[in-house]
Every structure is written in C-alpha cells, then in structure tokens.
Amino acid sequence: METNENIPVRLPDSRYEELKASAATMQELAGVQSYPIDSLWVAQKLGYEVHTYNKLGPEAQILARRYSEDAFILPCPKGPIDVFYPIYYNDEVVNKPRLNVSIMHECAHIFLGHPANIEMSKQQKEVEAKFLAKFILAPPIICHYYHLKDASSIRNFFNLSYEAAEYAQNYYNKWLGHSKVKNGLIHPTTTECRLLRQLNIETLSKGGIPV
Ligand SMILES: [Zn+2]
C-alpha cells in the first residue's frame, strides 16, 4: 500500500541505481517484452499470489477498503517458519491505470524483500517501492527511444494515470539533463541496455540513441 507519510528521504544515488537494476531483473524474470506493462501479469509471472478484495469475507472487505483503496500485501504463514505475501487488490477501482501502479508498488515491496526486512525503515521501503514501480512502468530510456516527451504521449504509451504520467515526464526531463551525451548520441547505462534488450532493441551497435 502507498502511504502518504511525509517522506524525507532521498536515497543515496547508488541505491537508486540498485533499484533500477532490480527493475530490469524483474522485467527479465517476468519476460516483459512490450509496453504498457500489466502489473497483474508481472505478479503472476513472478509467482506472486494475487487475490481480489471480493475474495475476502464481507467484514474483511470493509477493512481492506479502509486500509487501502487499491491494493496491499498480507503476510500468510507457509509451513512452520516460512511466510509468503499474497497481493490483494480492489478490482472495482475505476481508475485502472492507477490500480496498475499500485499493484506494481506491491510487487516491488515483495521483490525487494521489504516485508521480512526489519532493519529498513517503513519510510525507506515506501520510497523504494514507489520509485521502482514508477520506473519499471515508464523508464526514461524507453520514453526517449520512442520520442515520448510530453505527459500525454507518455500517458498513452504506458497506459498511466495522469499523476504517474506527470511524474514520468518530470523524471524523464531530469534524466535527459543527466544523460551521457557524446557526438549527439545518448549512451545507455548497463541497466538501460538491459531494459532495451527486453524489447529486442540493440543500441550499442549503433553507438547510442540520438539526443
Ligand atoms: Zn507501500
């Protein structure tokens, strides 16, 4: 679930790089080969159990809706020691693009091992899941490759909510400002090459992507 606690933190740059690499690993493991990404499909490909709120009893449904409008994960015992984390989501949500981000947010928590990590603060976990979900659904290198420079083309291409598309556009602009440009070409990082390779795009042979 996404909380609105005041989030202080900017993580160290190295952690953001790790999160981007985790996004590439998630894509590779799930076998994502095109956009928009369906978060439910990714969850299933990664072997995460997924249920709708309707599966819960009537009282639990009320609690679930109160807890999160969109989605959350719940610890469930699996054998004497192990615990696993099914994702519950509200399939009655009208704003499906927003629900898609929320489900990816929960996938990110699981993928990053957050539920069992008692050393990391709740705030850091939220920052990480939020970043990973938005990054994987609309990576700036993909915006650039497909010439998606304004919020509405980003929103249409990646099937995002207005809020997520605006975030993606701002993030893309920041990314563009920091990208390594040589001879009019942007040189993708190792992680970006992995994201592009998932779409069968080989850029290194061409020396980069035009700015
Ligand atoms: Zn969360």
Image (cartoon, rainbow, N blue to C red):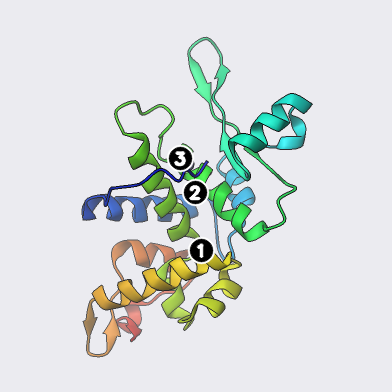
Helix, strand or loop at label 2? It is: helix
Q: Name the residue that disc number 1 marks.
A: 164
Relative to 181, residue 66 above or below:
above
Image quadrant in which the C terminus is located: bottom left
Q: Name the residue that disc number 3 marks.
A: 109
Q: Which kind of residue does numbered mark 1 sit on?
A: Ala
State whether residue 49 appears in this view. Answer: no
Task: Please tell me which residue is depicted at 32% across the width and 72% down the height of the picture.
Answer: 175
The disc at residue 24 is none
Helix, strand or loop at label 3? It is: helix
Taking depth in this image into account, of 170 and 149 the one nearest to the observer is 170
Considering every residue shown, the one lying at the far bottom of the view is 184
Q: Which one is closest to the eye, mark 2 or mark 1?
A: 1
Left or right of 5 on screen, residue 51: right
Q: Residues within 10 Å of mark 2 (few under 14, many from 20)?
A: few
x then y, percent, for residue 140: 40, 70
Q: Name the residue that disc number 2 marks.
A: 29
Left or right of 78 on screen, residue 135: left
* The residue carrying mark 3 has its beta carbon less than 8 Å from ligand 1: yes
